Amino acid sequence: MLKFEKGLKFFKIFILNNYQTFLAILSGILLFLSFPKFGNKIFAWFSLTPLILSILFFPQINVKKVLFLSFVSGIIAYCGILYWIIPTFVVAGEHWIFGVLSVLVLSIYCSIFIVLFCLSIYFYKQVFSKYNILIIFSLSSFWVLLEYLRSILFSGFPWMLLGYSQYENLPIIQIAEYLGVYGISFIIIFVNIFFAVKIFDFIVNKKSISLLIKNVCIIVAIYLLFYFYGINRIKVIEKYIQGKSEDNFSIVLLQGNIDQYKKWDENYKHEIMQRYTSLVMKSYYQIINENKNNKVLFIWPESSVPGWLFEDKVLYDWILNLVK
C-alpha cells in the first residue's frame, strides 16, 4: 500500500511538472488505441486533442519544444501500431532485431509528418490570436495533405491514415464513396482540432460553459448528419444484396489461396494470373447460366495482384481484359 501511494505521488508530481509531455504521451497512447487490435475507433476522434492542447496552452513554447512533444507522441503511437512487424520477421526466419529496427525506422518516418503538422499549429499560433473555423479548416486540410504525401513519397506508405481507424464504423465510412479515406481523415482531424480550440477558449480565454456546450452540439450535429447519411446508404446497398433493387447485380467472393511468399516471387506471377482468370471466368458463366444477369462484382483478397498494377503493363492489361 505504501509503495502504491509513493508511486501515485510520483505520478502526480510528474504530471504537474511535465504536463506538456504528459499530454503528448497521452495523445500517442490514444492514437495507438485508435487502431486494431487493441483499441477502439472512438479514440481517434480526440486522440490528437491533448497534443494540440500541449502547444496551445503555453505562450512561451518554442520550436524545439514542439519538435520534442510531437516526436514523442508520434513514436509512441506508431511503435504501438506497427508492433506486428516484429513477429512477421520472426515467422519469415529473420532475426527479431531486424523487426525492431524496421518498426523504429518506420515510426520515425511517420512521426515526421506529425511534427510538421504540430509546427503548422505553432506557426499559426504566432500569427493569429484566435482560431476561427477557417483556420481549423486550413489546419485540417494540411493534415490531409501530409497524409497524401506520405502515401506517395518514396513509393508511398499509406498505412495508419486516420480514416482507416473507422473501418468498423460503417455509417461514417460511407462518405468514402465520394471523399475517399482522406475525407474521413479530414473530418476526424477537424473534430480533434475543434475540441482542442474550444477547450483552450474555455480554460484560457474564459469563454462561457454555454458556448462550449453549443460548440460541442454543433460537432455532434455534423457527425450525426454524416452518420444518418451512412445509415441510409447502407439500406440502399442492402437492397442490392437482397435482390430488391431494379438495377440488381451479383457479388462474388473469390479466394485464390495463394501462398504469401509466392506473391513476392516473380516466378509465380503468371501462375497467379491464370488461377484468378480461371476463377473469374468459371464464376461469371455460372452466374450467366443460372440468373441471366451479366452484372457481376468480383471481390478478391488483399494483394491478389502479384505486383504494382500501375507500373506493370502486363498486369494492367490483364485486369482490363478480364473486366471486359
Image (tube, helix red, strand yellow):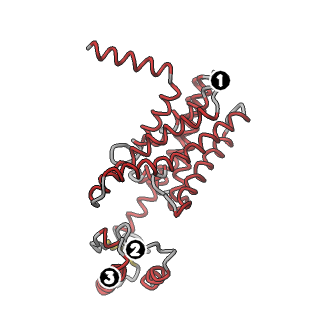
* Residue that extends furthest to the top in the rendered view of this protein: 2
One can see residue 132 in this view: yes
Q: Name the residue under label 3.
A: 271
Q: Which residue is drawn at 49% across and 54% down?
A: 229
One can see residue 291 in this view: no
Q: Is mark 2 on a helix, strand or loop?
A: loop
Residue 61 pos. (x, y %): 63, 28
Residue 231 pos. (x, y %): 43, 54
Classify the position of the N terminus by image quarter: top left
- Mark 1, other Cα within 10 Å: few <14 / some 14–19 / many ≥20: few
Q: Are marks 2 and 1 in contact (CB under 8 Å)?
A: no
Q: How far apart are marks 2 and 3 (CA)?
A: 11 Å
Q: What residue type is labelled 3?
A: Glu
| Foreground pick, 171 / 315 | 315
Classify the position of the C terminus by image quarter: bottom left
Q: Mark 2 points at which residue?
A: 305
Residue 167 pos. (x, y %): 41, 53
Residue 126 pos. (x, y %): 71, 33
Q: Distance between the residues labelled 3 and 1?
A: 66 Å
Q: What residue type is labelled 1?
A: Asn
| Foreground pick, 151 / 153 | 153
Q: Is mark 3 on a helix, strand or loop?
A: helix
The answer to whether 11 appears left or right of 279 in the picture is right
Q: Name the residue under label 1.
A: 205
- Mark 2, other Cα within 10 Å: few <14 / some 14–19 / many ≥20: some
Q: What element carries label 1?
A: loop
* Residue that extends furthest to the right in the rendered view of this protein: 127
| Foreground pick, 250 / 143 | 143
Q: What residue type is labelled 2?
A: Val
Q: Which residue is drawn at 47% across and 50% down?
A: 228
Of badges 2 and 1, nearer the viewer stands 2
| Foreground pick, 212 / 202 | 202
